[in-house]
Image (cartoon, rainbow, N blue to C red):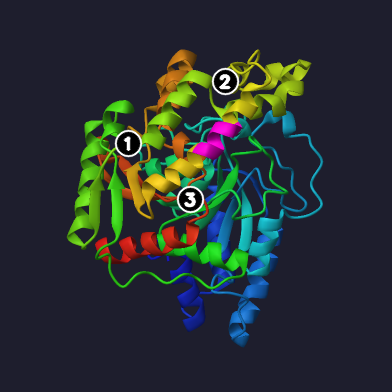
Amino acid sequence: MQDQSYTAVALSHAYASGRADPVEITEAALERAALAPAVFISMTPDRARAEAAASARRWKQGMPLSALDGVPVAWKDLFDIADTVTTAGSAVNAARPVVRRDAPLVAAAARAGLVAIGKTNLSEFAYSGLGLNPHFGTPVNPALDHGSRVPGGSSSGAAVAVATGIVPIAIGTDTGGSVRIPAAFNGVTGYRASTARYPRTGMTALSETLDTSGPLARTVEDCICFDALVRGVVMPEPLVNLTGQRFIVDPALTERYQVSDTVAANHDRFVDRLCDAGARIETRRLDALKQVHELIRADGWLGALEAFALHRALLDSADAVRIDPRVRARLETSRGIPADRREHLLARRLALIAAFRQELGGATLVMPCAPHVAPLRAPLETDPDLFARVNLQTLSLTMPGSFLDTPAFAIPSGVGEHGLPTGVQLMRAQNDDDALCSIAWSIERLTF
């Protein structure tokens, strides 16, 4: 099952019918992971084999723990997994002691029978939308212009692991776009959950306010299935059709964020498919999005202030020179910002979350994930100023949703120059995840 049928749900059906075996599938995943440079920071083969063997016994007895029992899963190396080191993509953390227990989200997946094969690479401290890592290498997706493009970040290894068929599902995190951007760049699906959706303990933080988790997979259905089983709830049902479902397109975004012609054209074709499926498209400007954009430009990024506070002791230590210079420079931009700025941004955030909900009026916002396709990797590795500019531009369309704590699905929208993927975001108001899941799944079933 190494083709497009290699999805988590398809594996479950294959296990149930006896057409596939969790042990064989896990061994194949471990072999593929070993042949993929820089995609994983560490592997957990002993655990994976033990979990796969237990799953195989359960399937033979007709007693799987869940629909995804025996499905291989990879975890971004921000999550604690028992008997491993959590590096957060940093050489500074490589000598940390191993952790004793799984993060709650990892433990929930294990209770559902998923097989943990290892921990994926990321931008250092999860603090970049491009995915470069000088310490553990940069994951390369050979399908991205012969491997010449960045994987997107910070959940770079997670996206590449799914896109290249190592695993059908990988779990990332998203502070300013770190699930949605690599999903879009690699042509896979990603789900940014509202911050209250999953436990955040046992996960190395970047921003105490904005951090959240989410799966990357080949399909919306896989993401929703994972979401339901780790929360111990029944999956939401897809809609019978999209007739009358309201979607909003904000025409100001294309110019505001300098969206490329390719990305804009694929976004418009995606919207046309919604319209053909009976959806109601409302083209109007959203003032809350404009206010978030202006607030970030004038007063800075809330996540940057919290990331600096978190890493300030390290930045002030002799170990600061061991940080990726690009990440270190970005962290340092928040030094000297007045102490009351964070409280100001938090207060504005609450008001804007409420305003955004009111403006949406129960509709779903559709917008691009990134203003461009995956950039070339080599120039960004050698030019720090170019890296800084491109990184901020790459994050520009996902940061507003993070600030507003919108649940969001990143869904492939087509391909552009050099055959590079593009993606759209489906977004709803904070904590409206269940409705978003039903709508996104319906779109996948009815328009693709």
Q: Can residue 243 be seen in this view?
A: yes
Quarter in which the C terminus is drawn:
bottom left
The mark that comes first in sequence, 3 or 1, is 1
Mark 1 and mark 2: Cα distance apart in space: 28 Å
Q: Which residue, given by chain and number where applicable, does mark 1 sit on? A: 145
Do labels 3 and 1 touch, CB within 8 Å? no
Q: Which mark is residue 330?
A: 2
The quarter holding residue 342 reads top right
Q: Is residue 154 visible?
A: no
| Closer to us: 426 or 269 | 426
Quarter in which the N terminus is drawn:
bottom left
Residue 403, compared with residue 444, is above or below; it is above
Q: Which residue, given by chain and number where applicable, does mark 3 sit on? A: 407
Which amino acid, mark 1?
Asp
Q: Quick check: 362 left or right of 332?
A: left
Secondary structure beneath disc 3? loop
What segment carries the magenta color?
346-351
Question: Mark 1 Cα within 10 Å, few/some/many (few <14, many 20+)?
Answer: some
Residue 10, compared with residue 137, is above or below; it is below
Q: Position of residue 204 (x, y in %)?
A: 69, 41
Overall secondary structure of the magenta stretch? helix
Q: Quick check: 260 left or right of 287?
A: left
Q: Quick check: 132 left or right of 85?
A: left
